[in-house]
Amino acid sequence: MNVALGLSPYAPALARHVSPEGCQLVVERNMLEKGVRLVLWLAGCPQVTGTVRWVVEDRAGFAFDAPIAADLMGIMRLGPQGPGLELRRA
């Protein structure tokens, strides 16, 4: 199920419904599993670590280890117009 993450340290994603405590991740295909620890990487921003809490097809709920700042939430909400979000196993 997480073959793509196993083959490459990075996978592209889109963050939706971003809050200080977490977000919904959208990936190209069903590649995440509940309980997986990830690092979210955005160019020029601090890395965010957390845990996948649920998975439904190409979407996953992601809980941050610590609340994120409002400016980072705004950048993540830019979606495809933003700096590009990548996932890496923690």
Image (tube, rainbow, N blue to C red):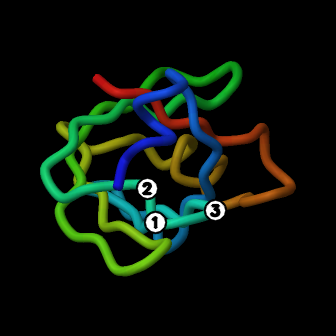
Please name the residue shown 54% across and 41% down the image.
Answer: 72
Question: Going by the picture, which residue comes out furthest to the bottom?
Answer: 56
Q: Where is residue 60 shown, x and y percent of the image? A: 36, 67
Q: Secondary structure at mark 2?
A: loop
Residue 31 image label: 2
Q: Where is residue 77 shown, x and y percent of the image? A: 63, 61
User: Depth check: 41 or 33 in front?
Assistant: 33
User: What crowding class fits label 1: few (fewer than 14 Cα within 10 Å), some (14-19), or many (20 or more)?
Assistant: some
Name which quarter of the figure residue 54 lies in.
bottom left
User: What crowding class fits label 2: few (fewer than 14 Cα within 10 Å), some (14-19), or many (20 or more)?
Assistant: some
Residue 20 appears left or right of 25: left
Q: Secondary structure at mark 1?
A: loop
Residue 80 appears left or right of 11: right
Q: Quadrant of the N terminus?
A: bottom left
Question: Mark 1 and 3 residues: CB-CB less than 8 Å, in contact?
Answer: no
Q: Which kind of residue does numbered mark 2 sit on?
A: Met
Q: Quadrant of the C terminus?
A: top left
Question: Mark 1 and 2 residues: CB-CB less than 8 Å, in contact?
Answer: yes
Q: CA distance from mark 1 to mark 3?
A: 7 Å
The residue pinned by badge 3 equals 28
Q: Which kind of residue does numbered mark 3 sit on?
A: Glu
Residue 1 image label: none
The residue pinned by badge 1 equals 30
Residue 8 appears left or right of 24: right
In this rendering, the answer to whether 36 lies above or below 38 is below
Q: Which kind of residue does numbered mark 1 sit on?
A: Asn
Residue 14 appears left or right of 4: right
Question: Mark 2 and 3 residues: CB-CB less than 8 Å, in contact?
Answer: yes
Question: Going by the picture, which residue comes out furthest to the right?
Answer: 81
